[in-house]
Image (cartoon, rainbow, N blue to C red):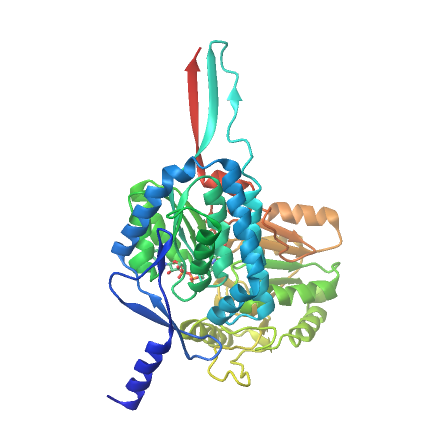
Amino acid sequence: MSDQATRANASATELERLDHWIGGASAQPATGDYIETVSPMTGAAHLRVAAGDAGDVARAVAAAEAARDGWRRFPAAERGRLMLALAQKMRAEKERLAEMERADTGKPMAGALGEIEGSAQYFEFYGSLVYLPVGDVLDVAPDQHVFTRREPYGVIGVITPWNLPLNQAARAIAPALVAGNTIVAKPSEITSRTTIEMARMASEVGFPAGVINIVLGTGEAVGEAIVRAEAVRKVAFTGSVGVGRAIGRIAAERIIPLTLELGGKSANIVFEDADLDLAAAEAVKGFTLNAGQVCSAGTRLLVQRSIYDRFMDKLAAEIAKIVPGENLGPLITPAQFERVKGYFTTAEEDGARLLAGGGIAEVAGQEGGFYVKPTIYADVTNSMRIAREEIFGPVGVAIAFEDEDEAVRIANDSDYGLIGTLWSRDVSRALRVADRIEAGQIFVNVWNTMSVQTPFGGHKNSGYGREKGIEAIHHYSHLKTVTVKI
Ligand code: NAD
């Protein structure tokens, strides 16, 4: 055996192992296989994650199916108390959870802590909604008592990505639970740790066994098996457009509903009458937060020509405040690192002007990490690949426009429709433009202040269905009408 192979074996045996969570207990994969992940901060081997298969999914679905009736009939107040207890536990252990999230993703601690707080808020918010009325009484005829009621689907499949791991899982799991469903979830194989920890904590605070089940592994082996499982009656998917389409085909065959939360290439429009200092600071935050690995990133900056040069100077000054390894984390994987570097080459070939960044970043002590410099390209046209494709790195592109009509035309000339942001002191214009942008969320003079209360979802290729807010409960329950002859 070569020295290198010996070292690899030694490190594999020392790495922490992560198993599924099925029926209220840790469960090893039937295959006995594990996927080795690497740290985005150093490139070194990080964790061994269970490589589940269809058999493991079948075990988890059976556990969720067995827990289904009990959970549905659980008193609402009791269900709410459990949700709040889980939120409290997550908060009490937020540093530990944030350390785990940071180790998996490399994100700065402030971002990781914010993500855990947001995750706790989902359980708190939905836990407090258990007393919402679940139906209406309809005045159809004097000799009929007619009422509607919202009922759970049964078992919900939840499939989530790696960029905000616990947050995205909590966003779907909390409303699904409060609507009376049980769960089979699959986090990204790269960032599974906090989702498993959440399920373990749920058991500790008293959630019945089988209500929350987590199966680890790849999308092909585990994700697809969840979508195909007969007892899974709805799937909430957060991820890429390509996988969303693949899941959509299976769901169409099975006639089950989906919530699809997919990508974005969101426009951030700066009009000449805006507070330019604020707009520049927020714009840079908008495409560098979480190293740009955010579906709602404001990556297309549309800037009115009359202030274009002035605004580029402000952007350059703001971007200088973003320091890799300090307030900018690495990209998640070697593949994502290569992908983003590829866009630097594409931008150059397409003739975009590099305003800042545009290459890899060296971080002292983290030489093997997947860091790139925060980057902005100027003089971009909306037909360039860097303006059309979701890069998922800390890369913004600046496009000039003449007037309101052209700004709206460019903003809507995209396959995506997740977020639209605009900066202007003219309230009438702000409302007009907000009305015309094809996106699920619009922000005026602020970037991305979302809360658990605000419904969230896409137009066009950004997906359909809504997460968050009271609205999400309607996506995790369906309506039954009961007519009684008196
Ligand atoms: P991805 O689509 O590659 O993977 C998402 C999840 O799907 C992972 O758990 C993966 O293992 C699983 N998966 C992969 N192939 C599958 C298959 N054939 N069947 C079932 N499951 C499968 O996405 P990603 O690279 O992990 O995440 C980045 C993408 O997620 C970006 O496009 C981003 O915009 C999007 N995203 C959207 C939102 C939103 O709320 N709209 C939020 C976060 C991320």
| Residue 132 to residue 367: above or below | above
Whether residue 292 appears in this view of the structure is no
Q: Position of residue 55 (x, y in %)?
A: 25, 55
Q: Quadrant of residue 399?
A: bottom right
Viewer-proximal residue among 187 and 426: 187
Viewer-proximal residue among 138 and 457: 138
* 228 relative position to 99: left or right: left
Q: Position of residue 11 (x, y in %)?
A: 35, 80
Q: Position of residue 154 (x, y in %)?
A: 38, 40
Viewer-proximal residue among 447 and 170: 170
**Residue furthest bottom in the image:** 3
* 455 relative position to 428: left or right: left
Q: Quadrant of the N terminus?
A: bottom left
| Rendering quadrant holding ligand 1 | bottom left
* 122 relative position to 482: left or right: right
| Residue 357 to residue 454: above or below | below
Q: Quadrant of the C terminus?
A: top left
Residue appearing at x 50%, y 9% in the figure: 142
| Residue 131 to residue 6: above or below | above
Whether residue 15 appears in this view of the structure is yes
Q: Position of residue 290 (x, y in %)?
A: 55, 67
Viewer-proximal residue among 162 and 445: 162
